[in-house]
Amino acid sequence: MDFFSENPWKFVIGGALVEIGLVIALVKSGRGFWLAWIGGVAIVAAGLILVERLIVTEREQVEITLYDAAEAVEKNDINAVMKFIAPAAPRREELRARLPRYHIEKVSIKNDLKITVNDKTSPPSATAEFHVVVTGGDRGGNAHDVSLPFYFVVFFERDKDRWLINGYDERSILQGLK
């Protein structure tokens, strides 16, 4: 199933390459039946791209949850952030107490995001590892407009039809670098 989802570029590039070959055949031969093939390939490629867009995999759902939680943090909306945290998460109350001390302006998740889904656990779980730069300051006025890099490992659990954050580890920013 992941072949048809996660990334539409294989269909875009594959379709474009086949189309180029068919156009070359059309120009060289001058035979109109190549137009039918060109149209057919375009329809199939468009259909595959549509299927890719309509299927949201578990990994993509975790990614959406992560970005939505980051957006709630940027809005400094503690209640919205807490909606992404599992009720039984070990660090839930710590997070609830810690967030109001800061004013966050920007949460920039870097492009090294790696998500692993484990559907063999009960409930299903996932792990997201990534670098992030958080810009903001403390509400006491001691620091503002400060950008700090972090490396996070965030743990998720499936709760009915959505993913919730069950915990996180903050690790050395050197981790994950290649």
Image (cartoon, helix red, strand yellow):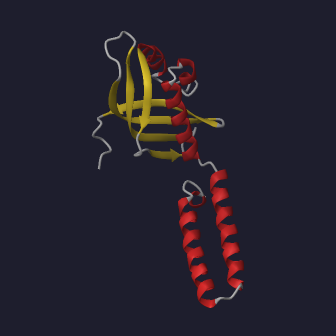
Q: Nearer the viewer, residue 126 or 133?
A: 133
Residue 119 seen anywhere in this rendered image of the structure: no
Residue under the image location 54 percent in, 56 percent down: 7
Q: Position of residue 144 (x, y in %)?
A: 35, 18
- In the image, is 170 to the left or to the right of 106? left
Q: Is residue 113 above or below residue 8?
A: above
State the quadrant of the N terminus: bottom right
Outermost residue, bottom direction?
A: 29
Residue under the image location 32 percent in, 16 percent down: 143
Label tally: 0
Quarter of the image holding residue 141? top left
Q: Nearer the viewer, residue 116 or 118?
A: 116
Q: Position of residue 94 (x, y in %)?
A: 44, 17
Q: Is residue 17 above or below residue 123?
A: below
Residue under the image location 70 percent in, 73 percent down: 39
Q: Is residue 159 above or below residue 17?
A: above
Q: Position of residue 139 (x, y in %)?
A: 40, 12
Q: Position of residue 27 (x, y in %)?
A: 60, 85
Residue 145 seen anywhere in this rendered image of the structure: yes
